[in-house]
Amino acid sequence: MPLFINHLTRRAFLRNTAIVGATTAFSARSWSQVAGANADIRVAVVGLNGRGGSHLSSLRRIAGVRLVALCDVDTAVLARVKSGLGEAGAAVRTFVDIRELLAMPDLDAISIATPNHLHALQAIWAAQAGKDVYVEKPVSHNIWEGRQLVTAATKYNRVIQCGTQIRSGAGLQEAVAFVRAGNLGKVTASRGFCYKRRDSIGKTQGPQKIPATVNHDLWTGPAPMTELRRAKLHYDWHWDYVTGNGDVGNQGIHQMDVARWFLGEAGLPRSTISVGGRLGYVDDADTPNTQVVIHDYASAPLIFEVRGLPSKAEAAVAATVGDQAGAEAANAAAKGKKGNRGGTPMDNYRGVGVGNVVECEGGSVVTTDYFKATAYDKAGKVVKEFVGSDRHMQNFIDVVRSRKIANQYGPILEGHLSSALCHLGNISHVLGRGMSPEALREKIKADAPLAEATARMSEHLAANNVNLAKTPLTYGAPLTIAPGKEAFIGAFAKEATPLLTRQYRAPFIVPNLG
């Protein structure tokens, strides 16, 4: 019996007992046996804020796809989205609990755009119920549950696609092939960047009220049931380690996925180190807004950088870091600026704010767009340009029809490995300790990639009036990964190993699928 059914209400369980047997059989049968290769693919979107809206728009544009259901734990969001469908929404069912949605017999696939801490569990439940899955990045909240999701795809014979849509563009596919063919010589460093303005989320003075329209138990899922300690329930969960993964796991997974793709690395690095912190304001978040993560691969280092502050100091952030009044003034001023989340001037590296720079012995490849790349020689002359477009959701539907897993642009194994890079960076940070600028420089001077990136980061922070003597950067725990395994060895193995997973809150427990 699929495990998800154990968590249904007694009424729903009794109502759907017959369906359980049907869905179990479904998972072992081919698509042609169930609905016919030319039949409509019946889909539901789970999680309707943010990326969920994009999923909905993409799916509705694909021929042969029929939207049959919507699911969100916020009934206000459900009502708004259903209303926005107009006449087309009349036949669309709505659900608050994904487990009841998955009991629908007339449902073939779902797309998941819920908060990160729900991704793996919901996708596994869907696979157990015989549904194919498109799941947003990162595919997991921790490394262990990501591996269970990879196992679920094989065990239940399901298509599970990760939302790393950059992989679907022909331009980037060609650029990767161009580099791997040796046209620019050996890769010396594969860099990813997220220089993206992120304002303070504010500092509350006590527990906040959960919106009456939200089922907080379902929203919390496998995470600990705690009081809301930030002003906004939605979106700002990204900056709380209990539910999100910071910008390393938000925007950053895209760029680390691309960086690893260019390297051709099919596993985890030999080691990982993070240097960073949440600097420039004081708020309710606990994930870094400024960070460098180095993944040491045998082929070349993978270097990823996060910056959430603007490129130059603004009057509003001139207050001493750590002073609450100054932080609140900085946040208020930033919010008064047009485009504070993306329009405020930001740093760049070779013209890249959000994107990648792949450095090679004979030149480089630069991406400033999800689906475009430019190759340069050592003198900076353009060698070749690559252009593509987003075909990711279409590819998911095509593979759902054909069952040809090899044709997937975002296979779940690749999504898991790149998600794991985010988690490794965060584990290093969480286990780290603050260090004075002088001590940090001495500590990292032998690690050339880390020393170079940290020096640039320190200059950036100084330009934003961040006093690192008063609010030091966190030098993360140097993590060593067991060769060919998703496990730690070495000095910090004992402290890091528990962070490969989490304590799950019953009944929202990710199953161990072996």
Image (cartoon, grey):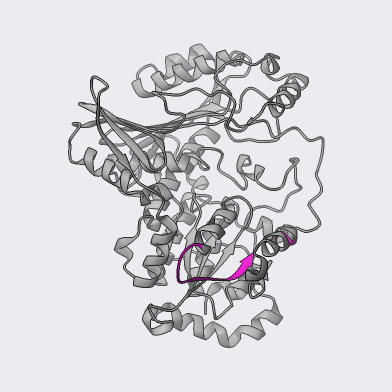
Say whether residue 100 is visible: yes
- In the image, 442 versus 374, the foreground residue is 374
| Snapshot quadrant of residue 280 | top right
Q: Count how many numbered circles sit on residues in the image.
A: 0
In the displayed structure, would residue 475 be above or below residue 510? above
Magenta region includes residue 406: no
Q: Residue farthest to the bottom? A: 18
Residue 90 image point, x, y percent: 67, 73
Taking the image as shown, residue 39 lies to the left or right of residue 434, namely: left
Residue 512 image point, x, y percent: 48, 64
Residue at 74% across, 19% down:
326
What are the residue bounds of the magenta stretch? 61-75
| Snapshot quadrant of residue 269 | top left
Residue 378 image point, x, y percent: 23, 22
| Snapshot quadrant of residue 454 | top left
Residue at 53% across, 50% down:
141
Residue at 55% across, 43% down:
245
